[in-house]
Image (cartoon, rainbow, N blue to C red):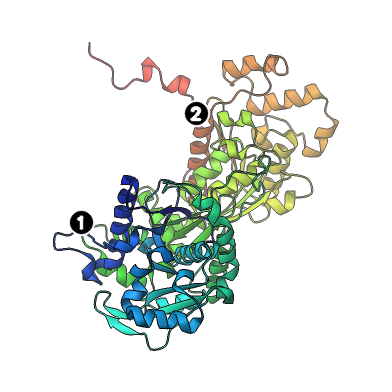
Amino acid sequence: MNQQWHVSAFLASVDTVVSNEIVETVRELRARVLFDRGRRPAFRSEDGRHVDDQDLDYGAWHFVARKEPGGPPLGYIRLSTPATGELFQSRAFLGDAGFERILREAGVTPGETFEHSRLVVEHRARKLGLGAYLNAVAIGAAHALGAKAMIGTSGTKDGQHLFHERFGFRCVEGTRRHVEHYTEDVVIMFHDVAAGAGEYHELVTRMRGEFPELAAVEHTPAVALSHRRPHNLRGGADTTAWQPVLLTPTVAADREALQRLLDSGQVREIHDSIDAQIDELIRSREPWLPPHEDLTRRRHEQLGGLTDWEYGTWVFYPWSQRLVHVLPREEFRLVRTDRNRGKIERPQQRSLLGRRIGVIGLSVGNSAAVTFALEGIGGRFKLADFDEFGLSNLNRLRAGVHHLGVNKAVISARQMFEIDPYLDIEIFTDGLTRQNLDEFTDGLDLIVEECDTPYAKIAAREAARRRGIPVVMDCNDRGMLDVERFDQEPHRPLLHGLIGDVTADELETLSKQQKVDLILAMVDAERISPELRASFGELGRTLSSWPQLASGVALGGALTAEAARRILLGAECVSGRFYVDFADLITPATNTARSSV
């Protein structure tokens, strides 16, 4: 069972202000969920307040679940001990004689019997394992506190009694009857601790072991059950995971896999905004709808008989342990690119999503790859980089300190999948090599080349020219954009002829100075910025590497995206080298808002 829920425990005492405040909070939560949009009207008073006042709350354990400490409560359950046995709901339902008869027939005494009740879960957290998790928490706590039996009442309209049977409870024969307060039939459930907890026995046993630590934290409703002091601070996260898991609940195998995932303890956080996404889908199709139009009927039609949790796709990101609910693929992309319209129309967007793009070098190339994913330029990608993300990369790459030591292609793939989980991505963590050159370039419609290795720069272009693949590059200096249309010019000299006829295989025979001269020729040393020119003599002395800024890298992502979109859509974009130099563009001479003063 999942551990993404943060559960706090509290034993309510009638003589403390803190207890009174918490009890009032959980009572309002319970009543609001039980009211269920009017299904059980008895839980709302005439003045509109949600009410569920029960004396049984005092002397009972209360368990509240949240997504994160301090977050809004999403679920709740109560566990009453024999100390308040005279107030048990089950005793009130059965009467004293009926209650004691059931215990006597089961061979237990009132002093050995606990009652759990008021299991409620917010709509947005249902079907995601929270109800089962909370039930296991309460049962495990009862076991830890010495219970030999548990008893409780259960509704039957939505199969709640069947849910409890999965935990080893049984319906007590002859106790089912309609209760107007709940607007449904209610039945007594009984649990023999010695018989185990059914299919959830392992989880209940684990919760039993965790209860003493949970109970030791007093008066802190935001404390999480799964929060533990780390035993090994040197332990690290998986630095290799980069592919999400996509699960469609309407497919039986995926539905089972989703439940196994929720039961596995791997899910740290669940994010479900499917209702809002469906609303956006409706408005993207019908933009003329008034802003405050009630979309309930249209949303119901969109679901087509499915419950909201069954609709679309659940995406699990193993590197962050997040489980996210999104629209089906085509609808997701229709909404995600809706604001492109007017600049990129839907037929063009569909054409772009059908293209495969290769990105070599994921430092500057990271900006290009992420921008492409955001703009919907390409639906399939190949990413190549051998390097790991280092602290000095944080001056220009959109990543975080938790990415240190992670391969740059892995980081980029993760970021792109978090934008669009339906992308098709391959990664090459050895970079571009002789061994994988053909595999990498096969099937590409465009190459973005942003690596520092001379071999890869030349070999990629040689392969692109053979295969008729256009190449774009940003130099990250003076906004230099390089475009080579090998798809239109199959005999075009590499890098516009700036490097002569040198081949990738010949690079091994060049001296260090010759390689430096080659790089200078590639970037056209006469046109580089004064700052970059001055840095050449300082490399290895006062500078550890080429100077680069985040603003230049971000501009490179924009420039390569603009060129790629034009090329892939057949718009005008000729071979050449172009500069978008801020030093030239932001000057008094180019100011269009000159003051008249």
Task: Identify which residue is drawn at 54% across, 60% down.
Answer: 2
Dot 2, crowdedness within 10 Å: few (<14), some or many (≥20)? few
Label 1 crowd (10 A; few <14 / some 14-19 / many >=20): few
Amino acid type, label 2: Ser
| Residue toward you, 422 or 69 | 69
SS for dot 2: helix
Label 1 secondary element:
loop
Residue that label 2 marks = 551
Q: Is residue 574 visible?
A: no
- Please tell me whether residue 406 is drawn above or below residue 91 in the rendered image: above
Say whether residue 409 is left or right of residue 99.
Answer: right
Quadrant of the frame with the N terminus: bottom right
Q: Residue furthest top?
A: 597
Q: CA distance from mark 2 to mark 1?
A: 40 Å
Relative horizontal placement of residue 483, taking residue 374 as reference (left or right) = right
- Asked if residue 360 lies left or right of residue 152, the reply is right
Q: Amino acid at mark 1?
A: His
Residue that label 1 marks: 292
Confirm whether residue 404 shows in the render: yes
Residue 337 % position (x, y): 40, 53
